[in-house]
């Protein structure tokens, strides 16, 4: 059966995926890429270690003709960085809800109405029932969806079928696959990031943020996002 796999093998299904842009990471993910219609968790040691640069190849491709929603990012998006990364900045939306509850509500509405090709949501704390709800909504949407939250939640139970732990490394990020449909991944994967010195060493020091910034605001519970 197509959707049944052995525990020793990566799952292969008819699910739509998009390459991460890194061959080593693709080779460790089911169907070789980021899954669409799925909740993907990125658990970061701290904000700004390269999590958006990790998504950069995918978001760049999608922004060419689809909208990208950034919901409650920890830093203001920046138009200059978008242009530098060759994003279609007119398709990048910044959603700034006042509360976490509004951020979750806004994310659900975006996923349900299919107005965006991708959604990136930042949350520090999220209740298990809210996670399950997001996971169910994501399954019914033709959208790529990432939830970024602290690494301290790594051991928490989650309905997400794909969870990655990100730590800073010289020249890129070190990626541990916490959960996937397939065997346990023993070794971390080094993903180089463009514009950083080459290397593979883990870092424990503070790092400058790489999150993009755009001067656009939308309020929570507003279905139409503001155009950048």
Image (spheres, rainbow, N blue to C red):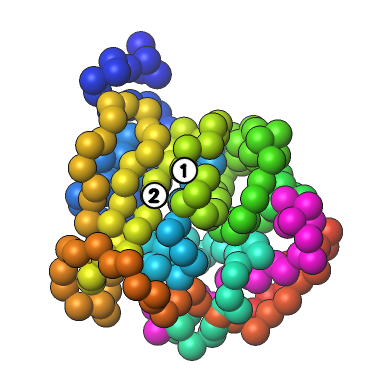
- Mark 2 neighbour class, 10 Å CA radius: few under 14, some 14 to 19, many 20 or more: many
Q: Which residue is mark 2?
A: 165
Give the residue displayed 45% in from the left and 70% down from the top.
48
Q: Does 92 appear above or below 161?
A: below
Q: Viewer-proximal residue, 52 or 165? A: 165
In the image, which residues are magenta?
Answer: 84-104
Picture quadrant of residue 99: bottom right
Give the residue displayed 58% in from the left and 75% down from the top.
75
Picture quadrant of residue 21: bottom left
Q: Viewer-proximal residue, 156 or 196? A: 156
Q: Residue furthest left?
A: 199
- Mark 1 neighbour class, 10 Å CA radius: few under 14, some 14 to 19, many 20 or more: some
- How far from the left and from the top, in percent, is residue 64? 47, 68
Q: Secondary structure at mark 1?
A: loop
Give the residue displayed 65% in from the left and 84% down from the top.
215
Q: Residue furthest right?
A: 221
Q: Is residue 101 left or right of residue 204?
A: right
Pointer 1 and pointer 2: residues touching (CB < 8 Å)?
A: yes
Q: Viewer-proximal residue, 202 or 38? A: 202
| Gap in angstroms between the C-alphas marked 1 and 2 | 7 Å
- How far from the left and from the top, in percent, is residue 122? 59, 59
Q: Residue furthest front?
A: 204
Q: Viewer-proximal residue, 60 or 195? A: 195
Picture quadrant of residue 98: bottom right
Q: Does 135 appear above or below 204?
A: above
As for residue 146 lying within the magenta part, the answer is no
Residue 154, numbered circle: 1
Q: Is residue 166 left or right of residue 111?
A: left
Give the residue displayed 50% in from the left and 77% down from the top.
212
Q: Which badge, 1 or 2, comes first in the chain's sequence?
A: 1
């Amino acid at each position: 059966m197509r959707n049944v796999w052995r525990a020793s093998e990566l799952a292969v299904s008819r699910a739509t995926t998009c390459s991460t842009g890194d061959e080593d990471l693709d080779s460790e993910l089911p169907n070789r890429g980021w899954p669409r219609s799925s909740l993907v968790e990125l658990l970061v040691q701290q904000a700004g270690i390269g999590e958006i640069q990790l998504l950069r190849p995918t978001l760049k491709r999608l922004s060419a003709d689809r909208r990208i929603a950034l919901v409650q990012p920890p830093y203001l998006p920046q138009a200059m960085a978008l242009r530098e990364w060759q994003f279609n900045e007119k398709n990048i939306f910044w959603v700034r809800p006042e509360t976490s509850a509004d951020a979750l509500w806004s994310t659900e509405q975006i996923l349900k109405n299919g107005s965006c090709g991708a959604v990136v949501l930042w949350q520090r704390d999220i209740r298990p029932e809210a996670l399950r709800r997001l996971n169910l909504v994501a399954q019914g949407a033709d959208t790529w969806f990432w939830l970024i939250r602290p690494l301290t939640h790594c051991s928490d139970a989650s309905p997400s079928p794909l969870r990655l732990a990100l730590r800073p490394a010289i020249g890129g990020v070190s990626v541990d696959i916490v959960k996937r449909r397939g065997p346990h991944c023993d070794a971390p994967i080094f993903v180089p990031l463009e514009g950083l010195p080459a290397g593979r060493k883990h870092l424990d020091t503070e790092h400058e943020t790489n999150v993009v910034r755009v001067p656009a605001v939308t309020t929570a519970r507003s279905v139409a996002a503001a155009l950048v």
